[in-house]
Amino acid sequence: MIMTKKELGLRIPGPTPLPPEVTLAMSRPMINHRGAEFRNLWREALAGLQEVFQTDNECIILAGSGTAAMEAAVANLVEPGTPVLVVVGGKFGQRWADLTKAYKAATFELQVPWGEGVSTEALREAIAAHRPEVVFLTHNESSTGVRNDIASLCAVCREAGCLTVVDAVSSLGGAEFYTDRWGVDITVTGSQKCLMLPPGLSFLAVSAAAWQRIKKINSPRYYFDLERYRQANKIGEAPFTPAVSLVFGLVESLRLIRSEGLERSWQRHALLQQMTRRGLEALHLELLVEEKWASPTVTAVKSPPGIDVEKWRKEVASRTGVVLSGGQDHLKGRIFRVGHMGYIVPLEILATLKAIETTLRAFGYEAAGPGSGSAASASASASAAVRTAEEVWLNWPSMF
């Protein structure tokens, strides 16, 4: 079979490439979404989500994008006047702030420079100053490529008696995340990132403490009333018509993650991160985020001097079939982003770096020797900093 350009490299922070097994599963004929067969699939999906969330808490499946799960969290925890604190260090931290304001919460924002993570000291000071009831955090800010230390941040929130809500849309399944161990009250994620599905589903894991608060909150909600979903889960159904084909795919993707092993998936993404960062550095490109905050699923790169990065990205896609993301808001035209999440193998990262290098050369940027990016990337696969990297590399074909 001849591989087309589009099959060579969708390297954006979602939607991500789909495993063939998932595509095939979604092509199944429709079934009764109130019948026994679907109920069994729904229960299997809920159990698989608990494993990926690393939780014993109730999981909720919504037909809607990741923002739907974010809004559901806000709608069920916030009412007019509720004091909340939102950490804003990128586009999706800002989305939390926009949502809480839409529900008329008393929203206080802890602003963090885009490209940096939030410190526990800054969070502790903001909580002391504003005394929020709920704190909204972003685990992996895909607009900048920052991963925050959620374990430490949630510990600060617990000390202060605040509920915590975490956006893990672009990290769950691809980065270490322990909902229960870290004390996250609501974790939200979406289907189109590390879970290797098309856009259209989103998910929440909800703690006992969060359920207690939900019962007391009187904000208007109907489709996003989580208690409706909780009750429907008891009989293996959704309260409203579910996205049946996407549920077929979800069950298959969760089986694939279980087959690979969740920790091995984390290790694979750590390898892809190291390969990407080391390869880009070898091309003398400046990364937006320093190593301690670096995301395992997306890397942001500052635009090379003298390069119109938006025009260059279009040329990369046209010449090589590798599709990269640009910056958002004030970073538009100043950075590009490389997604390395979900159904991606190490060799595809090498191809991506080669595409970046050759196209930069066509634009007159020749800061490094030919092949230096892919060579450095390949060398990173043997780095001691990446656990079992060689095992991940060598055994990849058998993982799925």
Image: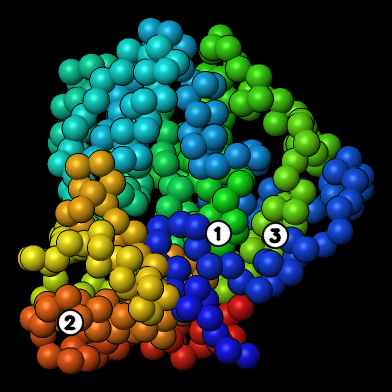
Q: Amino acid at mark 1?
A: Leu
Residue drawn at (64%, 38%) of the image? 62
In the shown orientation, is residue 173 left or right of residue 372? right
Q: Amino acid at mark 3?
A: Gly
Residue drawn at (58%, 25%) of the image? 211
**First of labels 1, 2 by sequence position:** 1
Q: Which mark is residue 195?
A: 1
Q: Are marks 2 and 3 in contact (CB under 8 Å)?
A: no
Q: Secondary structure at mark 3?
A: helix
In this rendered view, identify the residue nearer to me: 100 or 159: 100
Q: Quadrant of the N terminus?
A: bottom right
**First of labels 2, 3 by sequence position:** 3
- Mark nearest the camera among 1 and 2 is 2
Residue drawn at (30%, 49%) of the image? 143
Q: Secondary structure at mark 2?
A: helix
**Mark 1 Cα shell of 10 Å, populated few (<14), some (14-19), many (≥20):** many
User: Residue 231: x, y in percent?
Assistant: 75, 28
**Mark 2 Cα shell of 10 Å, populated few (<14), some (14-19), many (≥20):** few
In the shown orientation, is residue 136 left or right of residue 69? left
Q: Is residue 43 above or below residue 322?
A: above
Q: CA distance from mark 3 to mark 1?
A: 10 Å
**Mark 3 Cα shell of 10 Å, populated few (<14), some (14-19), many (≥20):** many
Q: Is residue 251 above or below residue 374?
A: above
Q: Amino acid at mark 2?
A: Arg
Q: Secondary structure at mark 1?
A: loop
Q: Which residue is mark 2?
A: 361
Q: Which residue is mark 3?
A: 249
In the shown orientation, is residue 186 left or right of residue 304? right
Q: CA distance from mark 2 to mark 3?
A: 40 Å
